Image (cartoon, grey):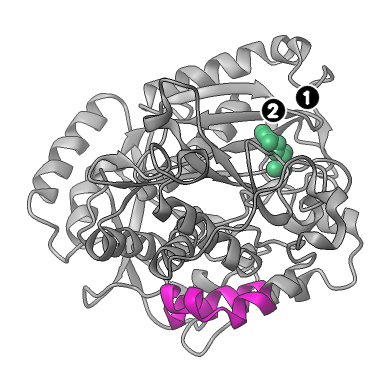
Amino acid sequence: MTTLADPVPGGRPGDVERATALSGELSGRGVHGVVLAYVDTAGIGRVKAVPTAKLASAAAWGVGMSPVFDTFLADDSIVSTDVLGSPDGDLRLYPDLDQLVALAGQPGWAWAPVDRITQDGERHPACSRTFLRRIVADAAERHGITFRAAVEIEWAVGRGPTADGEFVPAVSGPAYGAVRQVELSDYTADLLAACAAQGVDVEQLHPEYAAGQFEISVGALDPVAAADRSVLVRQTVRAVAQRHGLVVSFAPAVSAQGVGNGGHIHLSGWRDGANLHSGGAGRYGMTAEAESFAAGILTHLPALTAVTAPSPASHLRLKPSQWAGVFTTWGHETREAAVRVVTGTAGLRDQAANLEVKPVDLAANPYLALGCLIAAGLDGVTSSAPLPEEITGDPARLGEAVRRLPTSLAESVEEFREDERLRTALGPVLADAVTAVRLGEIAAVAGLDDERIAAAYRWKY
Ligand code: GLU
Ligand code: MG
């Protein structure tokens, strides 16, 4: 379980001793440096690194980094809000030692996600990991509900790097095809080995639908650890690929046409050790709370897409009949509904039942996406929101009877700006950062056609 306590200057009790022991152990294993990782508002992974010998100092006093990255765009240009985006100020990055691992795909390196606090030891209001820890703590305190989550990861594997940044698929075999599995046999075996060495519990790995596409799914964890894991797995997928002379893209749309890369989120709520999505009197065994949780997500979904599908490239992926879930409906095991109710196999349902949210991609900051989804679901629980009728089959054939999600980033930002519940959950600093960064991305691609938009984000995430 992730500790929900904030970092403090000097270190939380035991942190410095633990970091000292870890740094000795890592040095003994040939680890020279520790990557300190977080994800910015635009969904870009940003890092600093310290020599392994400085880990205890980082655990005690953090590592400095400017807050300006909270309003960075994917192309590294900078926008601003009332309080963010200036060259002033500094923050301290505190590694979470519970999540520190030696990177199997990058010998010589270890990795840890960070929380960011101010130089005065206060929470940084734009730290997305701190936001998610707070949402999870509040859910436990106010509602008595804990969560388990997992982020699915799809990516395209290319030959490369190519001189012009084009994507050249590294495989030619069919979707889910045995040919494709053999074509990248060594890479995928090394990837599984690296995940296992890092303690990542992989559930499945398979060749996916689009050109060069693969997918990995991992076991559920508490939401903060699940978000950390999604960042770590992507770092690993990329690093192992590089050792095989391959390049990878997690972009929502590697090219403008065809099926994109999703980052579907699986989420389940639990009370007193019991799964709220199983064994209840509602549809498919959902409890009343689970139905209302799903209803809350559906209600807020048009605004949520500004967080879960945050890139101009996200809207190249969000198309009907491509399993990206672009209609605000739910269905039982329906892969075209935005929310798929997963019941799992008879005999495992009390453990396995969950909701899968599909209009999520890997341009999303996973901490913001999970925190906002939980806040939206809990809004439904608080108001005992009724869950509408389910759909079956492809909602695209239902016409006006189903609501389509926003078809552009501009439209989803408008929805987000109107959504007081989400803005309140995020707090004004983070909510304004989300708005400013999304508007900045929209301006950055003004006048570009779809292929150029895909190219602009292809190698960023
Ligand atoms: N690639 C699809 C997407 O963009 C998802 C396919 C699947 O359901 O796994 O979301
Ligand atoms: Mg998939």
Residue 153, numbered label: none
Q: Which residue is at 73% across, 55% downward?
A: 327
Residues marked 2 and 1 touching at CB (< 8 Å): yes
Quarter holding the N terminus? top left
Residue 170, numbered label: 1
Q: Give neighbour class at mark 1: few <14, some 14-19, many 20+ (Cα, 10 Å).
A: many
Quadrant position of residue 38: bottom left
Q: Is residue 28 above or below residue 322?
A: above
Q: Could you tell me the amino acid type at mark 2?
A: Leu
Q: Which residue is at 80% across, 60% downward?
A: 401
Q: Which residues are magenta?
A: 413-438
Residue 246, numbered label: 2
Q: Which one is closest to the eye, mark 2 or mark 1?
A: 1
Horizontal relation, residue 25 to residue 424: left or right: left
- Mark 2 CB near ligand 2 (8 Å cut): no
Q: Could you tell me the amino acid type at mark 1?
A: Ala
The question of residue 421 being in magenta is answered with yes
Q: Residue 418: image x %, image y %?
A: 60, 82
